[in-house]
Image (tube, rainbow, N blue to C red):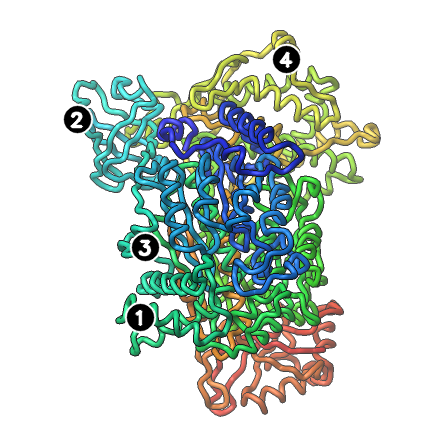
Amino acid sequence: ETDQQQQQQQPSNKRQRTHPPSDAVEASGGSTKHEMADTTASKMMEAEATAEVDEKLYSRQLYVMGHEAQRRMMSSSALIIGLSGLGAEIAKNIILAGIASVTLCDPQPVNSYDLGGNFYLREDDVAPTTSNTGDNGGTGGKSRAELCRDKLAELNQYVRVDLASSATTAPVGLTAESLSFLVDGMAVVVVTIPLPNATITALNTKCRELGSSFIYAYGAGAFGKVFCDFGDNFVVSDKDGENPATSQVETILPTNPAAVKVLEDQGRHGLETGDKVTFSKVKGLDKILSTDPTAQYEVKVTGPFTFELVGCDFTSCSEPATQGYITQVKQPIKMSFRTYEEAMIGPAEDELMMSDFAKFDRPGLLHTAFRSLEAYAEKQSGAAGGMTLPNPGDAAAAESVLEVAKSLDAETFGVDNEANARIVRQLSSGSRAVLSPICATLGGIVGQEVLKACSGKFTPIKGFLYIDADECLPESLLPVEEVTPTGASRYDSQVAVFGRTIQNKLLDLNYFLVGAGAIGCEMLKNWALMGVGCGGNGHIHITDMDRIEKSNLSRQFLFRSGDINEFKSTTAARAAQTMNAEMKITPYQDKVAPDSEHVFGDDFYDKLSGVCTALDNVEARLYVDQRCLFYRLPMLESGTLGTKGNTQVVVPHLTENYGATRDPPEKSIPVCTLKNFPNQIQHTLQFARDWFEGEFRQTAEDINAYLSSNDFAADLVSQQATKLDTVRTIQRVLVEERPTTFEDCIIWARLKFEDLFANQVKQLLHNFPEDQVTSSGAQFWSGSKRCPKPLVFDLDAKCEDAEMRNCFDFVVAAANLRASIFGINGRTDEEYFRQVLSNVIVPDFAPKEGVKIAANEAEAKEESNAPPAEMDVDTETSQILDALPKPAELAGFKLTPIEFDKDIDDHMLFVTACSNLRAMNYSIPTEDTHRSRAIAGKIIPAIATTTALVTGLICLELYKIVGSARRELQLEHLKNGFVNLAIPFMTLSEPQPPATTKAVLNGKDWNWSAWDSLDVNKGDITLGQFLEYFESEYKLEITMLSFGVSILFSFFANPQKVAERKKMKMTEVIKDITKKDLPSNQLFVILEVIANDLESDEEVELPYVKLRIK
């Protein structure tokens, strides 16, 4: 969606505020509160006016939110009440996202439960007088907000982090009266700790009065609650965040109403009746659709490829339209919410968001359970106010909460519904606990709701969302002594929920984290709080080849600007140990692939408890998946795409593996489309990318190879199909076009413009004139084939859509890239370029006869498969090589190849300009650099909120894998997740079991899966012993045994050779046949067998054999 469209759709929103009142906050720094507030107000107004967005920092996020939504966020403020675990998570996410300011309000001291979810608190921050009996316990030590403020402020230099003045809260506590002073000026108020119902209601009412959105959310052990009230008339500019539907015109008939048909080979139009669209580059219809490209037309859908334009009578037109582009215009919607007081008593069906479709009744059940818990906590506090939650393992308190639930809904919680009663008891027992995975999950969800309130983009949660992970919990409450906290340990919250035994298992886990990007950082944070790898026998291994870039800082929160260019894995490991000094972690910079198995080999995986992937490509995931299959290790997989996220838990023998199901491969662009018949901006961007690679990288590498080779002709023997092109290019660049000054580079760039965007098009039109018809009599230039027009060089011309000076940008970018290759200093001053270009002589074009241009993909394939005239190729290649200057004559001369990097502006300036010029050739709508970067660089949109959410969900699965006391893990307990925070939508579902193959061993059926192998743990035995073992153990006669592509044994082999090998150890046989030594760290040998049952003599289908040799 373009910024222009967003500006048209997004009305002024009352909730857009610049700053809270100056007397209600304490700013970070040395200025007085009034001075700092004045400064910030001025800064926020300036940001709103200038709309400056740091595209380097917010690069990936901008592809999620868009520039206009980002600008709105940059002029909005949020108040966060409560800085236990969830408050810190939300603050982290929205600060990374770049809202204007965040005010933290929490005067309470730290208790040990907070340490389970707040990554900025340490055990020595726990107030000495704090008794772990509730959020209001303790009076000594710094407050949670004070301890977090400075660390949160480090996350983003553009976001001001304020501290609510202690004078407004400390004397009276967190009451409605003290908190109401902070609401004015806030776009959104978020309460993240349990507060009395009257306080929540009063705050909600105050937000309504002042036009602020209100969110109430908190976690209680393995359960969580979210409530949103964005007012009576909240405007959503973009309900789902999906790109506007686009399609291409096949025909628009001049009828009443006008009937539109889109090109079927470009896919369905994706529109719904009532949608509005714009048209551009329309050919025909007497140009009636070309007069105003911003005009919007309402659609009535008549089929997947057809629709009508409501109210459009085109019968006066003399001709139909035969080509053009259609773009959906996304329309704003309005939403109305009920207050917390109204919705709490009896929420409507659409006010209880579903999160797990296997638990249809769970939202209503949890709504009542939380109401009961809150009523109990208020009653226990009595006249003192506040909330006193039950202690861990307190069975009497749990029964009291259950009695409240029964009074609210006797049918749901009666004697015949023990399963529902169990939920209430578990909620009660763990209600004080602050679990990192729950905080991360809720923090991602609520963080995005805050951004919705600030930006007006995406659909908010209407009413309540409840989540639970009761599958992690034991069937019944654990003994009090098993769950009683120490009052000083980081792990008190987990002990309170799962017990000490499970906590000890977490401490001794050995996990391999593959990737230290956004998901990797969030995962390490969760693990540091959970204690994963922090015990005497525990360890974390993390690997990532990449170094930190500025664009990482808006999502990968363990990194700071001072870490740029440092290795991600090392920096992330160091940051995680700062959170939990007990974590034992080893960073690597190796890619996890076959060529690193000397590092990550048998001895490495043999010590692991499991593997967690934090990767950005399918190929790497599939390799890790195969490793996990082989070593039978759990695999925790997660990924994000903007506001969408998915999680998959893989457990040996219980679930299918990651690679069991795969998405279809991405479609490639046909060669003839790229070369001669583009019709989408994706085609022109790929053309520009390919040209960049060929001209600025491959050519330079070929020349360097020539200059460094002792016999370049011999090096070309294996390149028969391309060697002539290679030497021609070397001759052109090294001899004919070799620049000596920057002026030469400018002249070269100008002539390249003429060749690419004028002469080649003229040659194409010479071969296929505009009035060309096919053999069937149809117009050649029709449908997806757009008739091109040559461009005229004009330094001042701007394209219609992107409004870029593409001619000027192309010459500047191309000349500087060319100069860089040859080690010539470049420049960008326009006057110099104008002076040089005014003297360039451009030769007149003369069409070439006999040039064959493929008219379709079939002809292109035939042309590429045609065998070269070998004699002519070899002769001409030799002649060119003989004419080239000898490498010795150019001693010390070397070119500098340029590897395309989407994050380098000079590279993208060239690619964007080149793409847009080609798009103008073919009347394709152009794109700006930001959008072009996303397409050409195949950028994956990303935002911190989704990342936090998926890591929270996958860590809940880790709890299940480790085990729950008094509960055996079953498939139905595990959950794969898919979320879309934009809609919002969340679904958790049971994984699929592995597919099985039936075999008969020892007369018994065996259904084996991809997880299974025939394990032989006999050491490095002889081949004869191996064959005998199969006969005695499995009643199988091996007829063929192979290692990779090498056959070690077969029934038809030379008997004498077989006899010799039977006496040799298995490793000796392998070495004898493959002529290679096995790696020293290899513990297993993989063998494939063909075997027959000894009794029936029938072949038995078997998995591979896994022989442990050490």
Instruction: Please tell me whether mark 3 sits on a helix, a strand or a loop.
Output: helix
Nearer the viewer's eye, disc 1 or disc 2?
Answer: 1
Q: Which is nearer the N-term, disc 4 or disc 3? A: 3
Given the image, on which type of amino acid does mark 2 rest?
Thr
Q: Give me the C-alpha separation between circle 4 and circle 1.
A: 82 Å
Say the numbered circle drawn on residue 255: 2
Q: Give me the C-alpha separation between circle 2 and circle 4.
A: 52 Å
Q: Is residue 34 above or below residue 468?
A: above
Q: Which is nearer the N-term, disc 2 or disc 4? A: 2
Q: Give me the C-alpha separation between circle 2 and circle 3.
A: 54 Å
Nearer the viewer's eye, disc 2 or disc 3?
Answer: 3
Residue 941 shown left or right of residue 695 in the figure: left
Q: Which is nearer the N-term, disc 2 or disc 3? A: 2
**Which residue in the structure is indicated by mark 1?**
406
Say the numbered circle drawn on residue 833: 4
Nearer the viewer's eye, disc 4 or disc 3?
Answer: 3
Decide: marks 2, 3 in contact (CB < 8 A)?
Answer: no
Where the C terminus falls, by quadrant?
bottom right
**Which residue in the structure is indicated by mark 3?**
344
Given the image, on which type of amino acid does mark 1 rest?
Lys
Residue 747: x percent and y percent?
Answer: 64, 16
Q: Give me the C-alpha separation between circle 4 and circle 3.
A: 68 Å
Instruction: Please tell me whether mark 1 sits on a helix, a strand or a loop.
Output: helix
Which image quarter: residue 251?
top left
Q: Which is nearer the N-term, disc 1 or disc 3? A: 3
Q: Dot 1 surroundings within 10 Å: few (below 14), some, or many (20 or more)?
A: some
